[in-house]
Structures are given as structure tokens and as C-alpha cells.
Image: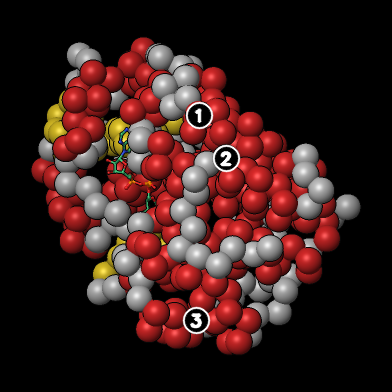
Amino acid sequence: MRFVHDTLPQRVRFASGEAAGQLAEEVRERGYSRLMVIATESQKALAERILGELPVAVWHHEVAMHVPAGLATRGREVAAAHHVDVLVAVGGGSTTGLAKAIALTTGLPIIAVPTTYAGSEATSVWGLTEAGRKTTGMDERVLPQTVVYDASLMLTLPVAMSVASGLNALAHSIDAMWAPRANPISAALAGEGIRALNAGLPKVAADPTGLTGREHALYGAYLSAVAFASAGSGLHHKICHVLGGMLDLPHAQTHAVVLPHVLAFNGPAAPDAEQRIAAAFEAPSANRGLATLRSTLDAPTALRDYGMTEDAIAPVVEAVLAAVPAGNPAPVTAENLTALLRAAWEGDLPR
Ligand code: NAD
């Protein structure tokens, strides 16, 4: 065996129903005294409840998906004007993303309190969007110092968003199997991530206010993000990255739609990944495992349902071709990539 694996330095506190107490303990232990709390307007009340009496220097609610560069600049100005010593992000991947954009230039530590399964809190990947182009990079400054996971915070996440976000998490595990820095450790984490999501998501869909499914899904989402963080972006992420940046499609739903197509495309050329994924699903094949899970979830199926027009397929293909990850198991051509994207656009699921 011969491989390189990076383990990222981060504390995880996982305790359902205890976000406020866990956050307070973390802030006290680290000695922070000027908090910048980032949360969307709609999650303000939740954030206030979690923050309690902690020393908040400023509340910030200006958050948007894919972190528009102008919002990053304003967030940095607010952090500087209020002399904050820590960023507390309460919300989904968009909220964590803004905290990361601020940390990237200021070096401020982040405590993340996630409320979706996006997993951004467990990676050192940042993203910024300017003029229809999403730029991403890796920098340890943006990795949250601590993550406070409280599955009860997900109980309000609507089923459709929970499903899309959960499949976004699953995409982290599946794509990690053949991403450029994939290794036996990331594959082991990804396998357990798939197992936990496969156990949790049907329970979430059937009983959105039940804690057990939410806990399994959240645990799986964390493992999947850790696997992705060490393995890097595979073909699936490159495709979704272009779709998100160029067309501003909703992140989680885009991942949910594209995943079965990339799995069917790469799986046959990656027997080890195929076998690991199938085993994690306890299914005869990886495709069957994913299809069975999706059938219990009323999963998103077509990019055209999210505003993509047919004439966008060609420019997306061109942009993805310029960014195909090294060592992708199946050779990628303009022809087969066009077929993949057309099927994802139409909602023609692989059989
Ligand atoms: P999001 O953060 O935009 O949230 C989606 C919607 O759900 C929002 O309207 C939000 O207010 C609402 N919401 C969130 N939690 C809720 C809750 N518990 N109850 C009710 N409503 C709730 O979406 P997302 O999918 O979590 O994140 C997408 C963003 O994260 C994208 O910009 C993507 O690029 C980024 N991302 C980054 C990484 C990374 O490693 N850097 C990984 C995954 C996603």
C-alpha cells in the first residue's frame, strides 16, 4: 500500500439538542469576546436562541448562495469595523461560505453551526462568484476551527431541501471514490458516509421531525465531507461547479440531479469504487443502490426543472472539458459529456 492522506485539524462537537450549551462551552474555552454571528434573516431567531448571552459584537444577515464577491467584501468590512475575534456561522452551506470568504483574507477563526447537510464546515474549500464565474480554492485558514453539530436544528429543514441536501452529501462520498487524491482512508470514510446517509435519508423523508434519521444523515454528511476534503473534486463536482457558477442553479438540487449520471458514467470504469459503493448500499450494484435510495426520496431528477435551458448544455460541456480531473476513471469526450448533460437536463435517469 502506498498513499498520501491529509487529515484536517478540527474539533467536532456532536450533541443533539445541545447547540447552545456546546457553543457556549467552546467560546468560553477559547476565550473569544467579540463574536460576529452570520445567519440569514430567516434563521435569525434560531441563531439568537443558540447564541443566548454570548458576547456578540455584530450580527450579519447578508448571505447568498455561491458567495457573490460583493457580499464577501461587505462581510470583511463589517468584521474589521467591529474588531471581531471569531466568526460564528449558523446556517447552511451559503452561510458557512460567507464566513469562509471573510476568514480567507482576515485569518479569523470560524465556529460553524450547520443547519443543512452541505458539509462545507468540514472542508478547507472556499468559493467566490464574480461575473458568472465561480472560483474555488483550498486554504486551511477557511477550515472552521470547531463544528457544533446539533441534529435537532435540521428538524425545520423542509423535506425537499433535506433530500436535495442529503444527496449533495452523498455526492461528496461517491465522487471521493475516484477524485484525484482518493486514498484508502478517504474511501473508508466515504463508505461509512454512504452507509449512514442511506440509513438516515429515507427516515428523514418518512418522518422529517424524527431525530434518529436526522442524526444518521448528519453523521453521514460529516463523514462524506471529510472524505471529499481529503480526496478532492472529482468529475461530479467539476460538472456541478460549472453549472452553479455559470447558470446560478441551486447547489444541492444540482448535485442531486447529476449524481446518478456520473455514477453510471464512471462506475463501470472504476471497479474498486463500484464495489465499495455497492457494498455500502448493500445493493447488487452501485447504480441499483443509488436508484433504490432515490426511489424512497422523491429526489430531484431534471436540471430543466431548476431553470437550465437546453442551449446552455454546449457552453457547460466546453467549460467542463477544460477542467476534467486528472485520472478520471472513464475517458471524457465532448460527445459522452454532452450525452450525460442532456440526460441530466431532461431527467432521463440511467437504467
Ligand atoms: P443554503 O445554505 O443556501 O440553504 C438553502 C436554504 O435552506 C436557504 O434558504 C436557507 O435559509 C434554508 N435553510 C437552511 N437550513 C435550514 C433549516 N434548518 N431549516 C429551515 N431552512 C433552512 O444551501 P446549502 O445547500 O446548505 O449550501 C449551498 C452552498 O454551500 C453553495 O454555495 C455551495 O457552493 C456551498 N458548499 C460548499 C462546500 C465546500 O466544501 N466549500 C460544500 C458544500 C456546499
Q: CA distance from mark 1 to mark 3?
A: 37 Å
- Whether residues under marks 2 and 1 lie with C-beta atoms below 8 angstroms apart, the answer is yes
Q: Provide residue 116's location: percent of width, then percent of height.
A: 41, 37
Whether residue 213 can be seen here: yes
User: Pointer 1: what residue?
Assistant: 206
Q: Secondary structure at mark 3?
A: helix
Query: Quarter-wise, where is residue 78 in the image?
Result: top left
- Asked if residue 251 lies left or right of residue 265, the reply is left
Q: Secondary structure at mark 2?
A: loop
Instruction: Name the front one of labels 1 and 3.
Output: 1
Q: Quadrant of ligand 1?
A: top left
User: Pointer 3: what residue?
Assistant: 317
Q: Provide residue 121's location: percent of width, then percent of height.
A: 44, 41
Q: How many residues crowd mark 3 within 10 Å: few (<14), some (14–19), many (20+)?
A: many
- Seen at 25% across and 61% down, the residue is 68
**Label drawn at residue 343:** none
**With respect to residue 337, does 35 lie above or below?**
above
**Label drawn at residue 296:** 2
Which callout, 1 or 3, points at the residue further toward the start of the chain? 1
**With respect to residue 226, does 345 lie above or below?**
below
Q: Which of 165/187 is in front?
A: 165
Whether residue 112 can be seen here: no
Q: Provide residue 243's location: percent of width, then percent of height.
A: 41, 69
Q: Which of 74/314 is in front?
A: 314
- Asked if residue 214 lies left or right of residue 28, the reply is right
